[in-house]
Image: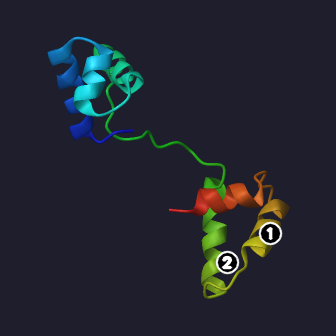
Amino acid sequence: MKRSEGIVEILEAFDLAGSYGAAAELAGCSHHTVARYVRLGASGRVMTERAVRDRLIDGYLAKVEEWVDRSHGKVRADVAHDKLLALGFEGSAEFAAGELAI
């Protein structure tokens, strides 16, 4: 997702050039990106921020934070994952690590 300044630049380039390809050259992006934002703009759905979605780990974050606090940050990821599985978590260790990354 582009920043709002980039989206405005893309839409202005399209208004000026009138084609996806020419607007892409002016804005320094792909013509596919131009097409996407022009379609979103026409539908009134241009978004400058990503939508926040529920994550698989959300229901378990309080427990993970508790383990981290109790262990003073020493809890190992594989141990935390095993404990999460026992609580019903259905994600892989790699998925959990990616979901926890901020």
Going 66% across and 69% down the picture, which residue do you hit?
Answer: 63
Q: Which residue in the structure is indicated by mark 2? A: 67
- Answer with left or right where residue 4 lies relative to residue 80: left
Vertical placement of 95 versus 80: above or below?
above
Location of residue 26 (image quadrant): top left
Going 70% across and 54% down the picture, which residue do you hit?
Answer: 95
What element does badge 2 sit on? helix
- Answer with left or right where residue 21 lies relative to residue 73: left
Pick the front one: 93 or 23: 23
What element does badge 1 sit on? helix
Residue 37: x and y in percent read 33, 24
Pick the front one: 46 or 66: 46
Vertical placement of 57 versus 51: above or below?
below
Q: Amino acid at mark 2?
A: Trp
Q: Amino acid at mark 1?
A: Lys
Disc number for residue 74: none
Pick the front one: 18 or 62: 18
Marks 1 and 2 close (CB-CB < 8 Å)? yes
Residue 27: x and y in percent read 25, 31
- Answer with left or right where residue 41 lies relative to residue 68: left
Q: Residue furthest left?
A: 16
Q: Crowdedness of circle 2 by 10 Å Cα count: few (<14), some, many (20+)?
A: some
Q: Which residue in the structure is indicated by mark 1? A: 83
Earlier-in-chain disc, 1 versus 2 = 2
Going 61% across and 63% down the picture, which residue do you hit?
Answer: 61
Vertical placement of 97 versus 46: above or below?
below
Mark 1 → mark 2, Cα distance in angstroms: 10 Å
